[in-house]
């Protein structure tokens, strides 16, 4: 159990625990529906830059203290305080002065959050953040009891006696260790000791016929990135036809069904399925963007033709490159599939595989020390911009240095000038996604999933694909 | 004896220092950051957090800082377990590992001695062959395979013991068995060979000729003399158990330090890697030191030559 400190946690386990023992201003329900949390009323100013919240009276911390507006001010300030070293503080970007405070250029108390008495809270933003309401239900925005945190000092959040909660459940005891071995978890599930167990690889195949298996899609995408700055193959990867050819050559259905076979889904585009819905029609973002029609379907003849033309355009006869991937079974198998598939479809292409430990892969991607790499990206909040923003030309996560003026323009409009107008913003993001897919700036491979065995007697579990996956507030067990 | 001990303790400290130094610099060669949210952070954000933790300083400065802090009992704070002090992380987990290791060692060696002695006494009968087969299997089956087999049959199918977790004696049975098999087999094989040797030696013949009973000879002369060399393999066996426990703890979800060690290496959790390296090397050198001392007690020849050297 890594951390129960909302200014420190970064992993899914910590987030799940805090989400169910604590409560932010709002709580994210089914399909990321924003439900009342600590705030009973919230209003946004016309320009979208000021939010005011009225807090529930009489809400208590588990030590009996009342939860007040000050607890939010303290918690938020502590998260952006560079001394805390929170690895999620960047998510505050857009709240007044947050970036400057994180960079140590402004005092912590200049953060755009103010308590007005015990039950009123005002938040000022630098610009309208359309997805702000989702952030309010995300763990790094949870309140903290100043007196308690300061009294616990370094121990805060590290053991059950050094944790306070204000949410649906109270933490009695931190079960020291998470079941790390998936075989053990499955055995424990089958003996009735666990109510849920996450499966991996081969286990999924073995359990598919059992009715207690649930496959939950995650807001996490695996995609192929090409390094346009690479000395040897950068020129080839800068050619749109070559990128398109690679995408058309992949049979994603075969990949997820026969190769990975752990319940992962065919990539619906760059933005994942079940992440965000059209605010007007309720259609899933992936349906509106329909990336399938613009470049990620399998078409061997088209792929071969594009590759031939592309190579001719850049003056090459052959394309040889190294494909890096994590050394996990999922990524290794995917890399091997890509290698064999590309070499089968294109006689001119030769792929070499390089399997790396996760941290090494990240390091190499960040320092542009790769030719092609399988990257994974997961969304923290239910808005397509959380995925799309990393592909803008100046984003540090755009490892392959893909640059497309149209895409940048659409995203700029969605994030800035057009941020206040919901449906216009939506259509800008749809256009951006379509541009990315037409250009195959990256080649989407699959959307990861969480295959689980679930005790059918446990009901009311709310699962979301982005941010904190599990909300147990309405969970119950039938006899 | 005091001089002998003093010299051994000096070597112990020296060994610890060398291990610490090598580990520190090797660890810094590993690519990647210790940050747990690295894939979401930009290089600037990483640089900021690095500054916060003093990781932006040159490696040798970090090394000296570490040594100074460590001698004051401050082993830093963990990255994977956001800011938990490494000393707390280790102290709250080491109990389970030590208990498991000690149980496996004691049970393994005792049963091993019995099995080995039995085999030697009943040499060249079917019972001897049975003990040989047991020790060959014990040596050749890796502990993690045995662990999964035990977990499945005795835990899930028969339901006699908990499948995993930690909390009371019944939880320790399966992991102890899985870990104890290797020392059991090793010591059984060792004791059998030694005892066969001893049983055919002249002084045993003499003892028998003096009119001592067969059990008396086996117990007083043969067993004691064949156990002396066994002490020399206790050290390597302890190493075996320590490395084996890393996997076993993972399989049985035991909150120990073995599992923690593997995780800290995979996540570049520098302070935890260092803390656990020191703990492991300390335990190892202590086991080796104890082995030497015990050996001296059992075999007076070593004690005498030791005090001279």
Image: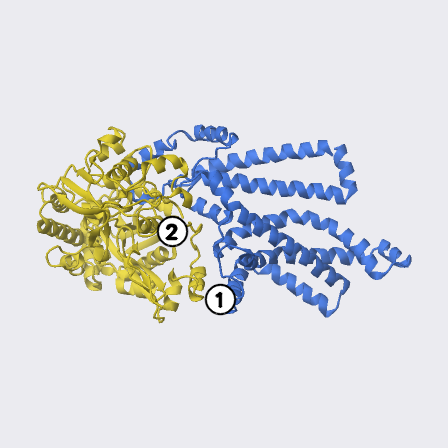
Chain colours: A yellow, B blue
Residue B117: mark in rendering: none
Mark 1 vs 2: CB contact within 8 A: no
Report x, y in % for residue B150: 54, 63
- Give whichever of A152, B53 is nearer the camera: A152
- Give whichever of A245, A259 is nearer the camera: A259
Circle 2 crowding by C-alpha within 10 Å: few under 14, some 14–19, many from 20: some
The local secondary structure at tag 2 comes to: strand
In the picture, measured across the screen, residue B77 lies left or right of residue B242, that is left
Q: Is residue B197 visible?
A: yes
The local secondary structure at tag 1 comes to: helix
Residue B156: mark in rendering: 1
- Give whichever of A109, B300 is nearer the camera: A109
What is the quadrant of the C terminus of chain A in the image? bottom left
In the picture, measured across the screen, residue B243 lies left or right of residue A80, that is right
Q: Is residue A307 visible?
A: no
Residue that badge 2 annotates: A355
Chain assignment, label 2: A
Circle 1 crowding by C-alpha within 10 Å: few under 14, some 14–19, many from 20: many
C-alpha gap between disc 1 and disc 2: 36 Å
In the picture, measured across the screen, residue B241 lies left or right of residue A251, that is right
Report x, y in % for residue B52: 35, 32
Q: Quadrant of residue A126?
A: top left
Q: How many marks?
A: 2
Report x, y in % for residue B171: 53, 58
Q: Are marks 1 and 2 on the same chain?
A: no
In the picture, measured across the screen, residue A451 lies left or right of residue A28, that is right
Report x, y in % for residue A8: 34, 41
């Amino acid at each position: 159990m890594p951390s129960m400190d909302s200014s420190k946690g970064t992993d899914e386990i910590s987030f799940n625990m805090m989400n169910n023992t604590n409560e932010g201003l709002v709580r994210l329900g089914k399909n990321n529906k924003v439900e009342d949390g600590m705030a009973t009323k919230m209003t946004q100013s016309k320009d979208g830059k000021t939010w005011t919240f009225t807090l529930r009276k009489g809400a208590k911390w588990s030590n009996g203290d009342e939860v007040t507006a000050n607890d939010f001010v303290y918690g938020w300030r502590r998260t952006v305080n560079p001394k805390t070293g929170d690895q999620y503080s960047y998510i505050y970007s857009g709240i007044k002065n947050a970036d400057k405070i994180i960079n140590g250029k402004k005092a912590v108390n200049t953060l755009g959050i103010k308590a007005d008495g015990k039950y009123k809270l005002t938040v000022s933003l630098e610009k309208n953040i359309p997805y702000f309401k989702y952030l309010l239900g995300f763990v790094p925005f949870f309140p903290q009891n100043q007196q308690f945190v300061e009294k616990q000092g370094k121990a805060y959040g590290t053991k059950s006696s050094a944790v306070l909660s204000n949410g649906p459940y109270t933490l009695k005891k931190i079960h020291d260790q998470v079941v790390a071995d998936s075989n053990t978890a499955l055995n424990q599930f089958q003996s009735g000791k666990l109510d849920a167990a996450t499966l991996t690889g081969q286990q999924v195949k073995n359990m598919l016929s059992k009715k207690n298996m649930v496959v939950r899609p995650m807001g996490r995408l695996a995609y192929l990135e090409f390094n346009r700055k690479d000395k040897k193959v950068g020129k080839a990867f800068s050619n749109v036809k070559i990128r398109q050819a690679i995408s058309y050559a992949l049979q994603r259905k075969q990949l997820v069904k026969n190769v990975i076979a752990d319940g992962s889904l065919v990539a619906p585009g760059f933005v994942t399925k079940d992440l965000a819905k059209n605010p007007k029609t309720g259609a899933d973002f992936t349906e509106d963007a329909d990336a399938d029609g613009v470049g990620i379907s399998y078409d061997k003849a088209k792929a071969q033709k594009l590759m031939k033309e592309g190579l001719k355009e850049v003056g090459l006869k052959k394309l040889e490159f190294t494909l890096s991937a994590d050394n996990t079974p999922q990524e290794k198998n995917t890399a091997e599939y890509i290698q064999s598939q590309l070499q089968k479809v294109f006689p001119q292409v030769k792929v070499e595989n390089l399997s790396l430990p996760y941290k090494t892969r990240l390091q190499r991607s960040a320092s542009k020390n790769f030719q092609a790499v399988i990257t994974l990206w997961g969304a923290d909040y239910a808005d397509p911009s959380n995925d799309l923003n990393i592909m803008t030309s100046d984003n540090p996560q755009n490892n392959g240095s893909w640059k497309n003026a149209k895409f940048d323009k659409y995203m700029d409009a969605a994030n800035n000038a057009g941020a206040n107008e919901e449906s216009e913003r939506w259509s800008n993001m749809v256009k951006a996604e379509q541009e990315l897919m037409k250009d195959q700036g990256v080649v989407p491979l699959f959307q990861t999933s969480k295959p689980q065995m679930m005790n059918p007697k446990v009901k009311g579990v709310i699962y979301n694909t982005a941010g904190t996956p599990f909300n147990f507030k309405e969970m119950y067990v039938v006899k | 004896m005091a001089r002998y001990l003093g010299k051994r303790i000096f070597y112990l400290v020296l060994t610890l220092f060398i291990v610490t130094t090598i580990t520190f610099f090797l660890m810094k060669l590993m690519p990647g950051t210790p940050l747990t949210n690295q894939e979401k952070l930009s290089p600037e954000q990483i640089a900021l957090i690095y500054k916060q933790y003093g990781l932006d300083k040159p490696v040798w400065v970090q090394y000296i800082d570490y040594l100074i802090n460590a001698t004051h009992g401050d082993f830093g704070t963990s990255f994977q377990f956001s800011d938990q002090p490494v000393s707390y992380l280790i102290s709250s987990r080491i109990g389970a590992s030590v208990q498991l290791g000690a149980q496996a060692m004691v049970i393994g060696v005792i049963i091993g001695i019995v099995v080995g002695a039995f085999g030697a006494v009943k040499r060249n009968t079917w019972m001897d062959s049975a003990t040989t087969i047991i020790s060959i299997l014990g040596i050749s089956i890796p502990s993690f395979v045995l662990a999964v087999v035990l977990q499945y049959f005795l835990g899930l199918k028969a339901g006699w013991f908990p499948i995993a977790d930690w909390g009371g004696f019944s939880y320790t049975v399966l992991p102890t068995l899985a870990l104890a098999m290797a020392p059991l087999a090793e010591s059984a094989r060792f004791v059998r060979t030694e005892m066969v040797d001893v049983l055919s030696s002249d002084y045993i013949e003499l003892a028998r000729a003096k009119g001592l009973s067969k059990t008396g000879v086996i117990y007083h002369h043969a067993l004691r003399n064949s156990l002396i060399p066994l002490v020399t393999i206790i050290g390597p066996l302890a190493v075996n158990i320590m490395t084996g426990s890393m996997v076993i703890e993972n399989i049985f979800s035991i909150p120990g330090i073995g599992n923690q060690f593997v995780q800290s290496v995979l996540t570049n959790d520098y302070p935890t890697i260092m803390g656990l390296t020191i703990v492991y090397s300390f335990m190892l050198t202590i086991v080796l030191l104890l082995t030497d001392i015990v050996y001296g007690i059992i075999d007076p020849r070593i004690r005498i030559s030791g005090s001279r050297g």
